[in-house]
Amino acid sequence: MGKVTGFMEYERIEEGYEPVEKRVKHYREFVIGLTDEQAKIQGARCMDCGTPFCNNGCPVNNIIPDFNDLVYRGDWKNAIEVLHSTNNFPDFTGRVCPAPCEAACTLNINNDPVGIKSIEHAIIDRAWEHGWVQPQPPAAKTGKKVAIVGSGPAGLAAAQQLARAGHDVTVFEKNDAPGGLLRFGIPDFKFEKSHIDRRIQQMQAEGVVFRTNTLVGELPAGSKVTNWAKETVSPQQLLQDFDAVLLAGGAEQSRDLPVPGRELAGIHFAMEFLPQQNRVNAGVKMKDQIRADGKHVIVIGGGDTGSDCVGTSNRHGAASVTQFELMPMPPEQENKPLVWPYWPLKLRTSSSHEEGCVREFAISTKEFIGKDGRVTGLKTVHVEFKDGKFIEIPGTEKEYKADLVLLAMGFVGPVGTILDAFGVAKDARGNAKASTDERGGYATNVPKVFAAGDMRRGQSLVVWAIREGRQAARAVDEYLMGASVLPR
Ligand SMILES: Cc1cc2nc3c(=O)[nH]c(=O)nc-3n(C[C@H](O)[C@H](O)[C@H](O)COP(=O)(O)OP(=O)(O)OC[C@H]3O[C@@H](n4cnc5c(N)ncnc54)[C@H](O)[C@@H]3O)c2cc1C
Ligand code: SF4
């Protein structure tokens, strides 16, 4: 345990942000991490609870009390060993995880949980600085070949685990660089892509082969998902060439809003808008980038993706940004005794919201209006959620001006044609059907084909993708070798 009286002596310290006026002028990360001394104080606050709820609240079951104690003692090297024992990529989660561990922390009963995410961030940054993150190639090779479709956090975590177990792993990715939504969805100001690049180098040194610009199967005609494939590989070819195949293709199919006027120019999916900016930041020249400069922007959808559209639009120099959410405004403070240690429903204000945005709740878009084929506005009505349905409130109809509309209403599931091409059965929501049982988990109905991450569970979080990638790797290893020493 850190310091016995630490939780009574020290306050929670939040990571800092660069001021708004400065950070909206660039696309770099703007979080100011903890100093050694601040991290030590955060670690000292941990009570090393007999039942560490944080550990259970964390999808990868990070051994949080142990690394909190190590940081308190200044033993950063052992802290990264503990962190890496459950999480391949704390550099990803230390930046973008919403930190369900902190919601579960016992100190959150007083609204001041241990700053677990900021400690994780501090540990992995120091580990990279000191050269402690090194490739771990396997001592012996098994001669077994595994294909992984998709290079998001699920595919990457699985690939690293399987390569370290001695298998020959090839990752197939239709985009021109690995990383999945980490690279093309999440904006650089939340997560710079160099974090992925150095992990790819580490994994290549561990033997993982990346085949980017390669689509497995085919996409439906007119599909708007990101795809820069220059070649195609058929599922039959993969099944013939590899001993096992793991499908980790994400849940990329955006939810549409089929109301009158949807065909007007200037209405785009968030996942058309966001990847373009990330590519421009990476040096790709783009002629027809969707831009928000000087425009009145309406973002439809109140979640993470919508918030990323708000931050990107403000960096473009939008005239105004308004975000719509269909659900009513949640309470600012959750009913703690009712929800702790679970993830609470409460009003969340992101750093992008702080940069400038009007937020409207309980609002539904009825129609897009336009002139000369371009969107100029939209018609809305306020709604009430009653008996499982949204009821329009008479007299609340309104028109908003809009030159650019971004649809960020979530994702309906994976691209079905890819699962169909493998003959993989789907669950009721269209995701790849596979259980997470301890034995035989992650296996689909098709022999030697497994599924993990958003493709199996639906659009979720990076940390869940890492968990599923790790667990699926163990399932694949067991299938290939009869037993596995990989952790679950
Ligand atoms: C805009 C946005 C912001 C987000 N912000 C956060 C956040 O702040 N924190 C958080 O925890 N989560 C966030 N998420 C969710 C998170 O990014 C995902 O849950 C996570 O990336 C899922 O990982 P995955 O590996 O399952 O799939 P993905 O990351 O979607 O990766 C799947 C990959 O498979 C590739 N692929 C698919 N089909 C094929 C095929 N047939 N052939 C070859 N390649 C294929 C795709 O091109 C893609 O690269 C966000 C999501 C979005 C869209
Ligand atoms: S729940 Fe909070 S105080 Fe308890 S062990 Fe976990 S981080 Fe420490």
Image (tube, grey):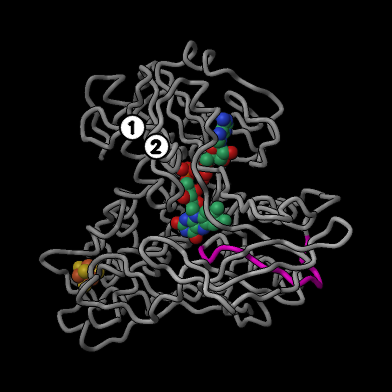
Mark in the foreground, 1 or 2? 1
Determine which residue is flagged by label 2.
452
> What residue type is disc 1 on?
Ala
Q: Which residue is mark 1?
A: 434
The residue most toward the front is 394
Side of 160 where 23 appears, left or right:
right
Residue under the image location 46 percent in, 68 percent down: 327
The amino acid type, in three-letter code, at marker 2 is: Ala
- The magenta stretch is 291-303
Q: Nearer the viewer, residue 51 or 390?
A: 390
* Residue 376 place in picture, x, y as percent: 80, 66
Give the residue at x 76% y 66%: 292
- Our reading of the magenta stretch's main secondary structure is loop
Secondary structure beneath dot 2 equals loop
Q: How many marks?
A: 2
**Disc 1 + disc 2, Cβ < 8 Å:** yes
- Percent position (x, y) of residue 342? 26, 65
Q: Is residue 199 visible?
A: no
